[in-house]
Every structure is written in structure tokens, then in C-alpha cells.
Image (tube, rainbow, N blue to C red):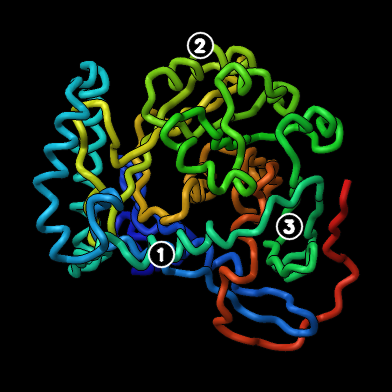
């Protein structure tokens, strides 16, 4: 399913990522956004159009643990009861009241958004019982064959078109007007004076998590090293902000992580809490990728927590908005927030993503994985347009 339109106040308008908007939140398409930013790509002496591999987003049914099903329809039917029994034994502790209320809010509010969106036929009616075999396979192949980390490179593309270029004998595609630093977060203090201050900083930290750590060991050379909360608090984010700045942090549903943001991390960066949004992950037919859980366990949503500079009195980011999208099967391949945040930022804002996994047009990206999803093998040729015009501005890549 490819989202193509935004329905808002009974009007349809073409847009890059937002496909449905209501007073409660948005439905967005990560895939359509990726397609849209590579409509014009310079490749040697011609212009081409690229599309991102849509297999990553073929989430056609709820997820089950891989050990609980082999992707076979019969196995899914046989094992469902045992799945619930295992989960019941494992998750015997009920969530605290505030988390139960949060679950209910996300569930009820997202159902309202999705119900309204169904009137515009935004979802498929096809439900497959293969446990999302296709998206799982492409994600597994991507990580098992992934390139190693590209460290200590930085560069920019100042052109108004995306470009394809070689780096370490591999081809990557770079969106228009982007800047990036393939560097460890510990090196950011060295570049504070160079990269300047920002209106928006987005972060998806590698939160410390034992179970995720076990899964990432085999891919350790191509993954961010997880950080303790006190290490995150020491990142000099305060030096990258101005008096009109917003910081948005993707956060797991861990109460300890949320508490750390509010009581340790934000204060150390000179920020005050402003709002909390929720990202609900859905299947292609518009249902959550897993059931809401009243016990300690996996939920179908994540949180985005916003802070603003203490001297800023004019930010009006609304609280408790819902962001809904089909998730990428790749770990931490988060949906873009570029357009949903536009109303709360100044015109032509300076935006930066830290711990970035892919590049965004007109953004600065920092992290060891900034080029992870830029490799040309993840894209297919949609159209070859014409011979490109000569430009005096070139893509710059350098190792520093």
C-alpha cells in the first residue's frame, strides 16, 4: 500500500508524507516520503528517479516471535494459543495505573483517527497469515549483508537535487541540501562551533536494553553501541541550541527512560518538558502490529518526548498527538517528522538529527549509521529522465 494523498477538511492535496490529518494526529507514509525525496537524482550525466525498496514496509499482519512461527499459515494457527500462554506466564505484572490510562488513550484516540481514514479507502482489505515473511526476509538480508560502519567521514550535498556518489568504492544516494557527519557522538563537542545552533534537534538514542543487546551482538560492527542514560545526559546538546529550540527524543515505553529524560537529561540540556506524542505502528490493513498489553511487555506504540529551551515562551507544541504509520521492518528505521513539525518551527528552520539512520533533505545528520539506508542497493530505478545540467556546486565528501 502506498499512501498518496492527504485528506483534510474534505480537501485532497498531494504531500510528501502526511496522508491523513485530524485534530488528534496524523497518518503518514514513510515509504511515500522516501520516494518523494528521490524524484530527481543526478547520476553521472543524467537525471533519474529512484524508489526505496517497498518490501521493508510490507507489514500485512500482526507480528509474532520468529520462534513461535516459521512463516507458515498452519503454524500460526497452531501456535497462537501457546503464544498467549507464554506471554501470560512471562508478563504477570500489571502495568501501573498511569500506564494503563496511557495505553487506553492511545488505543481509543488512534481508533478514532483510523476509523475516519477508512472512509477514504487508505487501507487494504487483504490479510495474509505469513507473519510478514517478505519484510522480515528483506530486513534480515539487509542486516546480515550490511556494510561496516563508515567512520570519520563528513560531507554535504548543496545541490537542489539528490545525487549518487561513491564512498569507499560503494555507491550511495544523497538527498538535496543535506549535511552529514559519520562520527561517534563523543566527537560532537569538536564540531559545536562549526555546525552552529539549531531550531530542532531530533534524537533516537540507543537506549540500554538487555534483550536488544543480545540480538545486536552478531551485528555489533554495524550498530550503535547502547548508552546508559547518564551518558546521554552528558552529550553537549545545550551548546547546539538557541533561545528558540526544540528537542524531540524517541523514547521506549520504559518508565525509567522517560523519568530519566524529564528529571536528568532535559535539565542537563537546559530544557523544559513541552509535550509527549505517540507513534502507533499499524499493518497495511490499519490494525496495530500487536495487541495493546496491560502487563509489562511489547506495545504497538512508542513515545516522542519534546523539550524546549527554558527562555522560549512561544513554543506551542500540542500535547498527546498520535502519529500513525506502517513501520519499516528494519530496526530503528523511524518515520520522518519533517512535515508534522513544520507548524511549530520558524520558516526555513535549521534541523539536526543525532543517532541518525538515514539522511534528510535540508537537515544535518550525525552518527555512525547516517548512511545505513542510503546505499544504492536499497533503491530501484523508477525512471530515467534526461541529461543533467552542469552545476558549479558539487557534492563534497571528506575524511576528517
Q: Residue at x 73, y 57 (%)?
A: 177
Q: Earlier in the sequence, mark 3 or mark 1?
A: 1
- Residue assigned mark 2: 263
Marks 1 & 2, CB-CB < 8 Å contact: no
Q: Secondary structure at mark 2?
A: helix
**In the shown orientation, is residue 78 left or right of residue 237?**
left
Q: Secondary structure at mark 3?
A: loop
The alpha-carbon separation of the residues under discs 2 and 3 comes to 36 Å
Choose mark 3 or mark 1, whichever is in front: 1
The alpha-carbon separation of the residues under discs 3 and 1 comes to 33 Å
**In the shown orientation, is residue 185 left or right of residue 293?**
right
Q: Earlier in the sequence, mark 2 or mark 3?
A: 3
**In the shown orientation, is residue 379 left or right of residue 93?**
right
| Residue 165 drawn at (x, y percent) | 77, 69
Which corner quadrant of the image does residue 269 belong to? top right
Q: Residue at x 12, y 37 (%)?
A: 85
Amino acid at each position: 500500500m502506498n499512501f498518496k494523498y492527504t485528506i483534510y477538511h474534505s480537501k485532497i492535496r498531494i504531500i510528501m508524507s502526511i496522508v491523513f490529518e485530524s485534530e488528534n494526529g496524523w497518518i503518514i507514509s514513510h515509504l511515500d516520503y522516501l520516494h518523494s525525496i528521490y524524484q530527481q537524482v543526478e547520476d553521472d550525466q543524467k537525471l533519474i528517479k529512484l524508489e526505496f525498496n517497498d518490501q521493508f514496509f510490507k507489514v500485512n499482519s500482526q507480528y509474532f516471535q520468529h520462534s513461535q512461527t516459521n512463516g507458515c499459515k498452519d503454524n500460526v494457527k497452531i501456535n497462537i494459543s501457546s503464544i498467549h500462554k507464554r506471554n501470560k506466564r512471562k508478563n504477570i505484572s500489571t502495568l501501573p495505573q498511569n500506564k494503563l490510562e496511557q495505553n487506553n488513550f492511545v488505543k481509543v484516540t488512534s481508533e478514532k483517527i483510523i476509523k475516519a481514514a477508512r472512509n477514504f479507502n487508505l487501507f487494504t482489505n487483504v490479510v495474509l497469515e505469513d507473519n510478514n515473511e517478505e519484510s522480515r526476509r528483506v530486513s534480515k538480508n539487509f542486516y546480515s549483508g550490511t556494510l561496516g560502519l563508515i567512520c570519520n567521514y563528513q560531507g554535504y550535498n548543496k545541490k537542489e537535487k539528490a545525487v549518487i556518489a561513491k564512498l569507499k568504492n560503494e555507491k550511495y544516494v544523497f538527498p538535496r541540501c543535506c549535511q552529514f557527519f559519520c562520527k561517534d557522538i563523543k566527537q560532537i563537542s569538536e564540531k559545536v562551533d562549526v555546525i552552529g545552533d539549531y531550531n530542532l534537534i531530533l534524537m533516537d538514542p540507543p537506549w540500554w536494553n538487555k534483550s536488544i543487546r543480545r540480538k545486536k551482538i552478531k551485528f555489533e560492527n554495524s550498530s550503535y553501541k547502547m548508552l546508559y542514560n547518564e551518558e546521554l545526559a552528558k552529550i553537549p546538546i545545550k551548546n547546539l541550541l538557541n533561545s528558540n529550540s526544540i528537542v524531540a527524543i524517541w523514547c521506549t515505553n520504559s518508565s525509567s527512560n522517560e523519568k530519566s529524560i524529564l528529571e536528568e537529561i532535559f535539565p542537563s540540556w537546559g530544557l523544559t518538558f513541552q509535550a509527549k506524542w505517540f507513534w502507533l505502528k499499524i499493518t497495511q490493513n490499519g490494525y496495530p502490529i500487536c495487541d495493546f498489553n496491560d502487563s509489562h511487555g511489547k506495545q504497538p506504540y512508542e513515545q516522542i518526548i519534546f523539550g524546549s529551551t527554558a527562555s522560549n515562551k512561544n513554543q506551542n507544541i500540542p500535547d498527546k498527538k498520535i502519529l500513525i504509520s506502517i513501520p519499516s521492518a528494519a530496526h530503528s528505521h523511524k518515520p520522518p517528522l519533517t512535515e508534522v513539525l513544520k507548524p511549530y518551527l520558524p520558516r526555513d528552520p535549521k534541523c539536526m538529527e543525532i543517532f541518525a539512520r538515514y539522511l534528510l533533505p535540508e537537515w544535518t545528520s550525525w552518527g555512525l549509521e547516517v548512511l545505513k539506508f542510503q546505499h544504492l542497493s536499497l533503491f530501484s530505478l523508477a525512471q530515467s529522465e534526461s541529461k543533467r545540467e552542469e552545476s558549479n556546486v558539487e557534492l563534497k565528501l571528506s575524511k576528517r
